[in-house]
């Protein structure tokens, strides 16, 4: 779906992520998404004002975008259902990928508030929208035979090194020893706690 060529000033998101007057890639995409959604509301029959938009209207918009999707989602009767790498073509429909929809909703949720929409009435954060995205995620994972996993945040190198150093200290005994009753006993150090061996 092509975005609108122009939009009212009130529909232009703030370019807080801009650098030297040039919007970031995220801000530019968010503006295009916002203009596309505004065009969808204007073409709605009857036309729909943003103030009257609900989670149900957001679902209509997301389902409308499916016709422009490029992700093959196999149906339950397809022989390639659940196959991550199908060996041949099939007549299953193309849909918007879950990841694309999830990112789109996140950008529109931010754009709604940046354009004066109240946080408590944000239709993109409605429970029905979250449930829909979860259903799309689960159904596409089964149909395509893929697993959606959360990306683990990488720890900074300094933090990782400090953690490894602490673990090494806890696992290895102190090289010194002490004499007790005429015998040598190693000293084990666990963090800040010193334990006598033997």
Image (cartoon, rainbow, N blue to C red):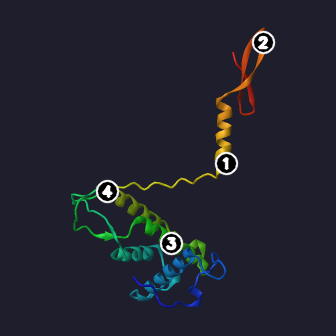
Q: Residue at x 70, y 19 (%)?
A: 197
Q: Secondary structure at mark 2?
A: strand
- Location of the C terminus by quadrant is top right
Report the residue marked by disc 3: 124
Residue 160: x and y in percent read 64, 46
Q: Residue at x 67, y 39 (%)?
A: 165
Report the residue marked by disc 1: 159
Between the C-alphas of marks 4 and 1, the distance is 37 Å
Report the residue marked by disc 4: 84
Q: Is residue 76 left or right of residue 61?
A: left
Q: Residues within 10 Å of mark 4 (few under 14, many from 20)?
A: some
Looking at the image, is 81 positioned above or below residue 56?
A: above
Q: Residues within 10 Å of mark 2 (few under 14, many from 20)?
A: few
Residue that sits furthest to the top in the current view: 182
Q: Earlier in the sequence, mark 3 or mark 1?
A: 3
Q: Quadrant of residue 18?
A: bottom right
Between the C-alphas of marks 2 and 4, the distance is 65 Å
Between the C-alphas of marks 1 and 2, the distance is 38 Å
174 and 119: which is toward the camera: 174
123 and 2: which is toward the camera: 2
Between the C-alphas of marks 3 and 4, the distance is 31 Å
Q: How many marks?
A: 4
Q: Given this view, does label 3 or label 4 mark the residue nearer the observer?
A: 4
Q: Earlier in the sequence, mark 3 or mark 4?
A: 4
* Mark 3 vs 1: CB contact within 8 A: no
Residue 29: x and y in percent read 51, 77
Q: Which mark is residue 180?
A: 2
């Amino acid at each position: 779906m092509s975005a609108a060529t122009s939009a009212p000033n009130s529909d232009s998101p703030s370019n807080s992520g801009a650098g030297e007057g040039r919007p970031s890639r995220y801000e530019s995409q968010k503006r295009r998404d916002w203009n596309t959604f505004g065009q969808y509301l204007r073409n709605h029959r009857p036309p729909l004002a943003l103030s009257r938009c609900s989670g149900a209207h957001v679902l209509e918009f997301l389902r409308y975008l499916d016709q422009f999707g490029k992700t093959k989602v196999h149906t339950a009767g397809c022989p390639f259902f659940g196959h991550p790498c199908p060996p041949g073509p099939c007549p299953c429909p193309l849909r918007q990928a879950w990841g694309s929809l999830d990112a789109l909703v996140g950008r529109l949720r931010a754009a709604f508030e940046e354009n004066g929409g109240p946080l408590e009435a944000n239709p993109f954060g409605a429970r029905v929208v979250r449930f829909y995205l979860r259903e799309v995620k689960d159904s596409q994972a089964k149909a395509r035979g893929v697993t959606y996993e959360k990306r683990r945040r990488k720890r900074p190198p300094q933090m990782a090194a400090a953690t490894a150093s602490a673990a090494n200290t806890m696992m290895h005994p102190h090289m010194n020893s002490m004499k007790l009753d005429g015998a040598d006993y190693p000293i084990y150090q666990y963090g800040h706690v010193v334990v006598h061996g033997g």
